[in-house]
Structures are given as structure tokens and as C-alpha cells.
Amino acid sequence: MDIYHISSVTNFIANILALAVGIFYCYRSYNPSYLRIFPVYLFVSIAIEFLINSYLLTIFHYQPFGSHQHYARFTLYNLYTPFELFMFAWFLFQIIQSFLVKRLLTACLILFSLFFIIYSLKLDIGINYNIIAVILESVIIIIPCLAWYRELFIRSEPVNLLNEPSFWLVTGIFFYLTTIIPFYVTSIYLRRHGLNGVGQSLSSINNFSLVITYMLFIKGFTCRIRRS
């Protein structure tokens, strides 16, 4: 088993663990309501990986889409990008105070949606992975993450970050998106030069980044646990 397959399985297990913890804690009354969207996000992530991840399909010996498995793989991965974008954007809308940043985020979401629709219709959503959309998603979400950090640092009242779910969630999202930007930019270069094998090995970066993100999510879900 090579590093990519190890990272793929580790990512899947961490995703399941984060979902289980999220279901158990995110809907408790003492936790902020914005947490309730994360189990939905994690469930969709697991479902897509279970349906189209090539290594997981090999382990479980099935192809849910039959002869259209390859097309379905690209289609679902591409559709997951705007899903993830809008999930993260909704969460950031709940915790950011700046109306200017919210307007900017709204404008970016509208422009991204137009780009995604046009790009998908022009090049066929199931033929290739839309790496440009992933990079745009990362940039769009990183901006409000930085804005939230700024608001956090200029607060007049002290904040106990160990018990602040939004800090761990924003940090998880920010870490993941800043990590995958150089990875995807590099993958474009590798693909253009026919180095697909190297590109697949580097995909372990994406998987391990997600593992760390899920661990930060778990911390955010549980940091307000009431102790007797």
C-alpha cells in the first residue's frame, strides 16, 4: 500500500469519526447553532468518497455507477466544490460582523456560480476535474477567514479560544484551503507535462490536510463540553 492509498483510508476514517462526533455534539443546546451545518457537510463528504473514490471501490469491490463510474466520479467531485463553498460561506456569514466582508463574499459567490455554470456547460462537468473552481473556492473562503481573524484580534473583551468553537472551525477551514492551493497549482503543471503518477502521489497532501482539518473540527465540536 503506497502513501496515497494510506492517506485515502486515513482521510475516510477521520471523516467518519468527525461525523460521529459532530452528530453527538453539534445539536446540543449549549453549542452555537452554526455547528449544526457541519454534520451535513461531513455526511455528504463521506457519501461522495464512498461512491466514487477509486481506492475505496477497490476495497469494497463495487461500482455503483457501472460503466459510467468514471464520468460520475468527475461530476460528483466537481459538484462538491460549490457545495463546500456555500457550506463554508454560510458558516462564515454567521460569525463575521463586517457588512463589507459579507457583501464581498456575496458578490464572490454570485460570480463563482456564473463561472461554474458556464465552465461546466462548455467543457462538460463529467470529463475533467475543475481545478480552477477549487482554487477560486479557496481564495473566496480564505478572505473572510482572514477577516474573522482580524475581528477576533481587535475585540475589546478577552476570548477563551480553548472554548470558542468558531476559532477551531475557521482554523480548520483556513489550514485546509491554504494547503491545497499550492498543491492544485502544482498538479496543473504536472498534468500538462504528463506526470500523472507524481500528481496522484502528491494527492496524499490533500488527504492528510483533510485529516488535520477534521481533527480541528472535532475540537471545535467538543470544546464546550459540560463537565460535572
Image (cartoon, helix red, strand yellow):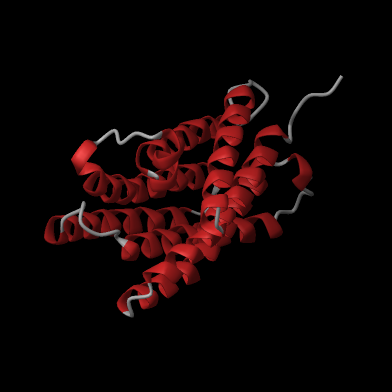
The quarter in which the C terminus is drawn is top right
Please give the name of the residue rendered at 30% of the width and 36% of the height, measured from the top-left corner.
Answer: 63
Left or right: residue 86 compared with residue 63: right
Query: x and y percent of residue 173 in the render?
Result: 55, 52
Q: Position of residue 17 (x, y in %)?
A: 61, 33
> Can you give x and y, in whole percent of width and height, for residue 78 in the image?
30, 51
Q: How many marks?
A: 0
The quadrant holding residue 49 is: top left
Drawn side of residue 145 relative to residue 221, left or right: left
Which residue is drawn at the image coordinates 57% and 58% (left, top)? 3
Eyeballing the image, is 128 above or below 193?
above
Query: Looking at this view, is 167 or 20 the one in front?
Result: 20
> Is residue 131 among what the camera can see?
yes
Q: Quadrant of residue 95?
A: top right
Residue at 70% from the left image edge and 40% from the top image edge: 219
Front position in the image: 170 or 6? 6
Q: Residue furthest bottom?
A: 193
For residue 216, side relative to residue 85 (left or right): right
For this rendering, which residue is in front, 76 or 170?
Answer: 76
